[in-house]
Image (cartoon, coloured by chain):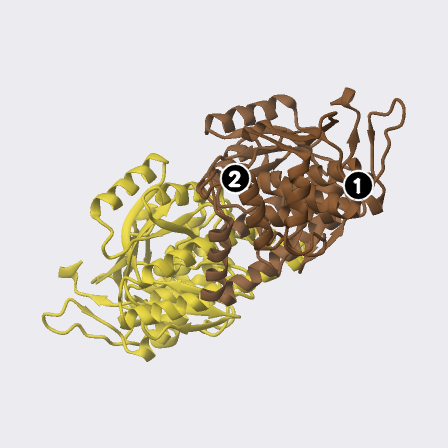
Chain colours: A brown, B yellow
């Protein structure tokens, strides 16, 4: 998933990446719940009975409309034996699972004993919304397991989509998972993970775009670590220091998001090549603006320069300040050009995937097609 | 001289470079006028009598308030034997001299026979206002020679400045020289050449800044040729194509100019080091914006990257699209850092001068101090 910018007043367009996260759920005959997250080296296992006791002992409500309370999270942390200073990814993944497992079973009825494995094509901790993808998978699986949502796979079809109403429920519970992991998330990542395609985020309101084309991209991880909190504080500082200079830049970023939406909706109907130079120009302008507001990084500049040498246009994605960038590929960009760009990016020490954006959201997949 | 940007509605700050243009005038005993411009390989010479005949034969007025007419310029071209397709710098320098010589002698009385040599530390044709510096020198010299302005050098003092009123006259005639050379110049370059320091240009109005500090800079010529006309057309195209995106960028550039003026005026009073990070940030933001409006160039990006590796901040100057960039140096930037940056810039194929901005304008200099 990808969100161009982070200042709160702005319009942002978030698009679904086609790097997928998979969850496999298998019922067990014994009264146990096992969870394996191989990409972060986590294996969890509990008896069903103490989980039921824990649910009964949790203070307050476990509703999808209420943020998880600190007391609830402390209790879960204690139950799971999470020490202070334990690796964040492991602890947060465990807490999110426990919270969703208990809250969903409390509301919709017992979740059967099961084996869960979650793995992902997304790198974790790169600002690409891997935690949201995990939360969407958990919510969809647990809601399906306890019968709150349906979605039977039809004979011979490899995938099935849930109804709008069911997706809405998945999204609301996935948001709870994100709240456990991030405290105060925007909800954009879980929404784009649930619905796929692209959506507009403005002043807390999330609106899916009607029609979205699938666009070829290179996704590049500079592997430079960044702190979203520090970046956002930096943007606010710049706004306070130079309001007359920075506010117009935010206006211009808003206008880029609107223009981008228009172009994407037009391309979904008329996928002519003529739209690509416009998108490329918007990429370039946006990347300059993101540098101006202070969420750039020399590694991202390098990414842009390297791809520019191959005639390709890139911009940072996610929080910025390191992390990932995306490079737009045209439908007719020759494969040797893409390969040469990838080679040069890898030479910089970056990781690189050829994928697409505007991909579909949560779906049930037959195990034979994974 | 240096002007950050070119879109007409914008506020720009122009500052005087301390790369000086010199004119030496020596009276002759024979009735001849000789002009040598060694930097562009020009040597001109005329008898005074045919110049007088030419003046009488020129159609229309030769007033400093009226732009030179096409008929007048054609007549001068014919007299000087300038063929179509002759090198532009030579032809335009010749025409500007003839026009100013004839117009000033027509208005203020005979200019004596003389030898004139003009040479410059400024590169020509690099968008640094070398033509304006030439026009200012010619206007000051010719007005002095015919007695229209004074400015005696005091014993023992190496330089003398003209009065405000005299500088105004020099500037108005220098503008005529610029009109001969450029057709429809803004008048900023001759103004900053005449008055020195820095000035604000907004909607055709030129206002000198009250107090200006002298700032150390590196001036770098990428030697990439550019066409101001094509660049300005490109900026206009972008404005028409993406008004909601581009207009705020112009607003932000305006705000940068205003902020820059404030910082410069503050620094003139309180030259504390704390102002430098602010100027550096303004340089960076402005450079991004100039790229967004389409007057950047990969050579200028390279210039910025190379100096950034030495912790220095650069931006394009002049028209952009190639041409020159300036790099801000702090008073305490160590000499080895500057030398290393210069070396790297020269390795890129660029030319590089260490100089300063906020320098004084037109002055009379004793020949012993040149």
Pointer 1 residue: A268
Image position of B175 (left or right of A194): left
Residue B30 drawn above or below residue A25: below
Q: Residue at x 45, y 71 (%)?
A: B62
Q: Closer to the observer: label 1 or label 2?
A: 2
Give the camera-side residue of B46 and A40: A40
Pick the quarter of the image with the N terminus of chain B.
bottom left
Chain holding disc 2: A
Can the viewer see residue B278?
yes
Which of the marked residues, 1 or 2, is nearer the chain's N terminus?
Answer: 2
Can the viewer see residue B56?
no
Element on which disc 1 rests: helix
Q: Residue at x 53, y 34 (%)?
A: A221
Element on which disc 2 rests: loop
The label shown at residue A144 is none
Q: Are the residues flagged by discs 1 and 2 in contact, CB closer than 8 Å?
A: no
Image position of B46 (left or right of A44): left
How many residues crowd mark 1 within 10 Å: few (<14), some (14–19), many (20+)? some
* Separation of marks 1 and 2 at Cα, in angstroms: 49 Å
Q: Residue at x 65, y 33 (%)?
A: A47
The label shown at residue A81 is 2
- The picture places residue B300, in percent across and down from the top left corner, at 44, 44
Image position of B60 (left or right of A27): left
- The picture places residue A234, in percent across and down from the top left corner, at 46, 56
Chain holding disc 1: A
In the figure, residue A364 lies in which quadrant? top right
- The picture places residue B156, in percent across and down from the top left corner, at 9, 70
Pick the quarter of the image with the C terminus of chain B.
bottom left
> Which residue in the rendered view is the most extreme toward the left?
B156
Circles 1 and 2 on the same subunit:
yes
Give the camera-side residue of A335 and A39: A39
């Amino acid at each position: 998933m990808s969100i161009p910018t982070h200042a709160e007043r702005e319009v942002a367009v978030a698009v679904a990446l086609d790097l997928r996260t998979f969850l496999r759920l298998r019922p067990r005959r014994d009264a146990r719940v096992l969870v394996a997250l191989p990409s972060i080296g986590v294996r969890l296992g509990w008896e069903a009975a103490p989980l039921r006791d824990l649910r009964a002992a949790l203070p307050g409500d476990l509703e999808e409309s209420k943020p998880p309370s600190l007391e609830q999270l402390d209790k879960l942390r204690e139950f799971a034996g999470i020490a202070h200073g334990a690796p964040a990814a492991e602890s947060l993944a465990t807490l999110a699972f426990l919270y969703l497992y208990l809250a969903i079973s409390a509301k919709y009825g017992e979740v059967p004993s099961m084996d869960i494995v979650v793995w992902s094509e997304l790198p974790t901790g790169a600002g690409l919304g891997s935690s949201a993808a995990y939360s969407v998978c958990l919510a969809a699986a647990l809601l399906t397991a306890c019968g709150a949502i349906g979605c039977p796979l039809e004979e011979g079809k490899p995938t099935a989509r849930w109804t709008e109403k069911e997706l809405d429920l998945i999204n609301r519970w996935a948001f709870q998972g994100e709240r456990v992991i991030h405290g105060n998330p925007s909800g954009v990542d879980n929404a784009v993970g649930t619905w796929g395609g692209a959506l507009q985020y403005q002043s807390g309101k999330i609106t899916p775009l009607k029609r979205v084309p699938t666009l070829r991209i290179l996704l590049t991880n500079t592997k430079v670590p960044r702190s979203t909190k520090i970046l956002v504080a930096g943007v606010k500082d710049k706004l306070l220091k130079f309001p007359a200079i920075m506010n117009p830049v935010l206006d211009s970023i808003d206008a880029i998001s609107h223009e981008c939406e228009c172009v994407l909706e037009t391309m979904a109907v008329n996928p002519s090549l003529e739209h690509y130079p416009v998108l490329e120009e918007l990429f370039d302008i946006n990347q300059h603006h993101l540098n101006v507001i202070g969420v750039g990084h020399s590694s991202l500049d390098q990414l842009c320069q390297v791809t520019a040498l191959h005639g390709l246009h890139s911009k940072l994605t996610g929080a910025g300040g390191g992390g990932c960038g995306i490079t737009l590929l045209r439908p007719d960009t020759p494969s040797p050009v893409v390969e040469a760009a990838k080679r040069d990016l890898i030479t910089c020490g970056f990781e690189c995937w050829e994928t697409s954006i505007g991909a579909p959201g949560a779906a049930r997949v037959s195990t034979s097609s994974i």
